[in-house]
Image: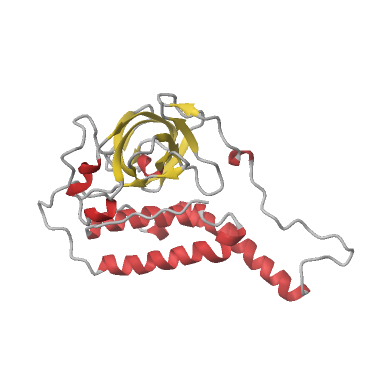
Amino acid sequence: MRFLKLDGPFCRTCGTAVLRDMTTKTMWQGWWSPISLVIITPFTLIWNAVVNAKLKKLAPPVPGQPGQQLDPGKPVLQRPAIYVALIPIIWLTLLIIQIVTDGGLSSSSGSSGDTGFHASDNSKPQKTLKLGQPSAQAQEVQGNGKTGKFTITPQRVVMGKPSDLDELKNKDKYQGKTLAWVYVNAKLVGGDAPIEGPMVGSDVGVLSEGDEPGTRLLLIGDLSSRPADCKEEDTAATWQKGDEKSFCRPFIVPDGKKLTTVTYSRGFSAAPLKWTVD
């Protein structure tokens, strides 16, 4: 189970893009445990609805505003992936009906049906790779209603300095933190092609010593400390099968702790892919 939170500030366009992407992922990835089904995912969707109401009150971005704006893409209800949520919802509805009509879950013969959740082989931990090795399995990423299959290859990590965070607002809350720039290569190897605007880098993560997760840093504008060869992901790009692109992501991590692992999330029901950082 993973909980993701992305802090702003956002303009209305970029905030809507991030909200739609995260809500869509919650709708098809967030139901696959009993607690998530009845508590966590419904609460997350309600919270996202509150955030969406706040975003709608913002003024449109001013022309010439610095930084590349994200493509909001289709509204959540127009994205096919969210209808995967009907499977657990229907299951829960049938379970409630059974409880109401039968007065319980056990059968009259004394044996009970298996009402637990079963994880597939996909949930088993995968072999930890080294930086520069491509993922053994292609990962599915959506963009504008299509699904592409990408191999993911984290290349290297460049550590920054605590002073790099001084340019951020509320810099005092980053005391004891520093930056890590993660370079990643992605290649479209299957699925729908061409595909427009897949956010391949949104599932990249990092772990420091003690398996402490880093926090992805979303920038409006840029930092002067960004390495010269560190390029942002082009989320408006169109990919053809065989296309290969590289990008770089900043993460806030504890200062003084070694960054040990780059991860790639495969949803709530599967262990993330991992690459060790030497």
Q: In this view, does 278 lie to the left or right of 55?
A: right
Residue 92 percent location from the top left of the image: 63, 64
Residue 259 percent location from the top left of the image: 39, 35
Q: In this view, does 270 lie to the left or right of 199?
A: right
Q: In this view, does 63 lie to the left or right of 132?
A: left
Q: Which of the two residues, 95 or 261, is positioned nearer the viewer here?
A: 261
Residue visible at 20% across and 43% down in the picture: 163
Q: Which of the two residues, 277 or 86, is positioned nearer the viewer here?
A: 277
User: In this rendering, is residue 10 above or below 190?
Assistant: below
Q: Quadrant of residue 24?
A: bottom left
User: In this rendering, is residue 160 above or below 132?
Assistant: below
Colour mapping: secondary structure
Residue 93 percent location from the top left of the image: 63, 67
The residue lying furthest to the right in this view is 109
Q: Which of the two residues, 100 or 237, is positioned nearer the viewer here?
A: 100
Residue 151 percent location from the top left of the image: 43, 31
Residue visible at 53% across and 54% down in the picture: 84
The residue lying furthest to the left in this view is 64
Q: Quadrant of residue 160?
A: top left
Q: Which of the two residues, 160 or 104, is positioned nearer the viewer here?
A: 160
Does residue 149 appear in the picture of this structure? no
Does residue 139 appear in the picture of this structure? yes
Question: Which image quarter holds the C terminus?
Answer: top left
User: In this rendering, is residue 12 above or below 261?
Assistant: below
User: In this rendering, is residue 243 above or below 76?
Assistant: above
Q: Is residue 60 left or right of residue 154?
A: left
How many labels were placed on the picture? Answer: 0
